[in-house]
Image (cartoon, rainbow, N blue to C red):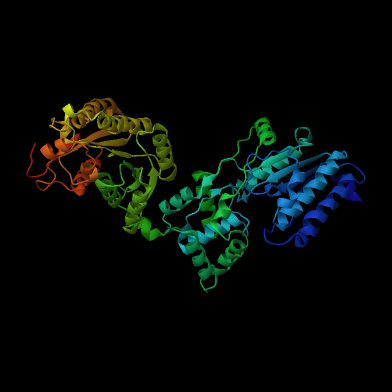
Amino acid sequence: MYLLCEIDSIIHAAATVNLVHPYHALYRANVLGTQNILTFAVEQKIKPVHYISTNAVFPEGLKDCMEDANMVTYPEKLHSGYAQTKWVAEQLVLRAQLKGLPAAVYRCGNIGGSQEEASWNQSDFTLLMLQGCLYTHMAPDIDWQIELTPVDFVSRVTVGLSQDILPSVGKVFHIVNPRTMDCCDLWQMLRTQGYQLDLVPYSEWYQNVKEAAGSSMEHSDTLSSLLYLLDALAVDPSFFSKHSTFNQTNLQAALQMRGLVYPPVDLELMQTYLSHLTSVNLIPHPNKLQQQNSVGILDGKVALVTGASSGIGAAIAEHLAGAGAKVALAARRMDRLKELQTKIECQGGIAITVMMDVCDEQQVRDGVQHTESLLGPVDILVNSAGILYYTLMKNLHIKEWQQMVDVNVKGVLTCVGAVLGRMVERRQGHIVNISSDGGRKGFPGLSVYCGTKFFIEGMSQAMRQEVAEFGVKVTCIQPGDVKTELFDKTTDQEAQEKYEMVNKMKVLEPGDVARAVVYAVTQPEHCAVNEILVEPQEAPL
């Protein structure tokens, strides 16, 4: 009787959360418990009810689920006992609301750990997935957008609205994170932190979890809990890509009124979680040996290398990683980048892959942002992406001319523009442009190519003087003929047969150019290497 009179409002969060148990096993806690709360809310005096529901009351795979949706169309499409009991309980609250009870419903998505302290529900699927990857040293190659909301943010929103009844009464709020994180970004971040993590097909990863769960190894109990959920929910990888999206009109209005911003699932949040979880041994600490192996003259530096999928770019990336730099491998051919990433990691280095077409300004900006979020601010930009066609001007290969201008000129400018501002702000940085001896002297058969490299040289010379006062260095590497794939793309056979020299003498190897880059970027702060001309011994300029 005392509580009936003294309680002013109710936040009903009690529930049994189990994604495997059937309806009848969850009925008492989730349905009958809610019915009892509603009875309590109307006895002696009216007590507003703030009910913590779930986004699982919607079937999987829907788009833009509305907060005021007509929910009566969905119960037959709900397959888990948890979703079914929460749907019934929510209907009890909504019907009580129609009869005059002040009530609000909060449909939550996945709830993650606190941002403020090391705490997380140890039965949570997302946490178990993370643990499963780190304990098996494998990550599944799946289409999974990681959605979660920090529990302290959920609490702040619900408690805040419960204290101010007018903006919340009669409304439904979707507390589901609209800014998710691709699991591939998380896997990359974990590798940069020193975790050994091989990307494998889902079936192979699942089998590894199953074997480890049945063994006597440490953490087998945790892996058994994960396996239990995988067997019940994720019999194939399509489970991870079936999630719905949610409209948040009511929630966004409430957040704006209270001056709150929904925290995205991003690398900063994940870094916070990693720090918290390692501090209480819920996940293992990174491999210190791998981190120690990466120490070198460029230790702590972040390098972004374009055109890193092959040839000169790949060699530069490997040499920079060998010198201790954390390297972002940027190019269009992700399969090649992943092979190089694996090679660098096997050598104890740190590398990430970045999908980047240097002719796409948005991709370049996104790639730089991705690099900085994973590795930190870019200290070294190596513009190695380039294209070469032998063409005779009289043969009018205009398409090839335009491609060379787009990649060799516009692409370099776009990449410089994406990093230079931050370098100037930080008063440090190094831009390395892979030019050519064709930027110092015009060669027949390469008129347009040489023109693009003359542009790079002129631009670099002027920029070097402009940014020197801000501590930013600009270096041009000018190689002669190098054994790469560039020469395989020419369509003007007349020009190639007449002027190509790569098969007529011993030319440079990509590693020769890479060593020149490492030399330039490892000089002391007061020493600037403006340009390095590297030629085959048989073909001096």
x, y percentage for residue 322? 28, 52
Asked if residue 218 shows in the view, the reply is no
Q: Identify the residue shown where x is 57% and y is 59%.
A: 128
Asked if residue 449 shows in the view, the reply is yes
Image: 433 above or below 200: above
State which quadrant residue 224 falls in: bottom right
Nearest to the observer: residue 493 or residue 29: 493
x, y percentage for residue 101? 86, 40
Image: 498 above or below 465: below
x, y percentage for residue 420? 34, 31
x, y percentage for residue 254? 69, 33
Q: Quadrant of the C terminus?
A: top left
| Total marks in image | 0
Q: Is residue 533 left or right of residue 130?
A: left
Q: Identify the residue shown where x is 52% and y is 61%.
A: 132
Image: 208 above or below 183: below
Q: Residue furthest bottom?
A: 216
Q: Identify the residue shown where x is 14% and y is 31%.
A: 440
Nearest to the observer: residue 384 or residue 506: 506
Q: Is residue 223 left or right of residue 31?
A: left
Q: Is residue 153 left or right of residue 183?
A: right
Nearest to the observer: residue 1 or residue 357: 357
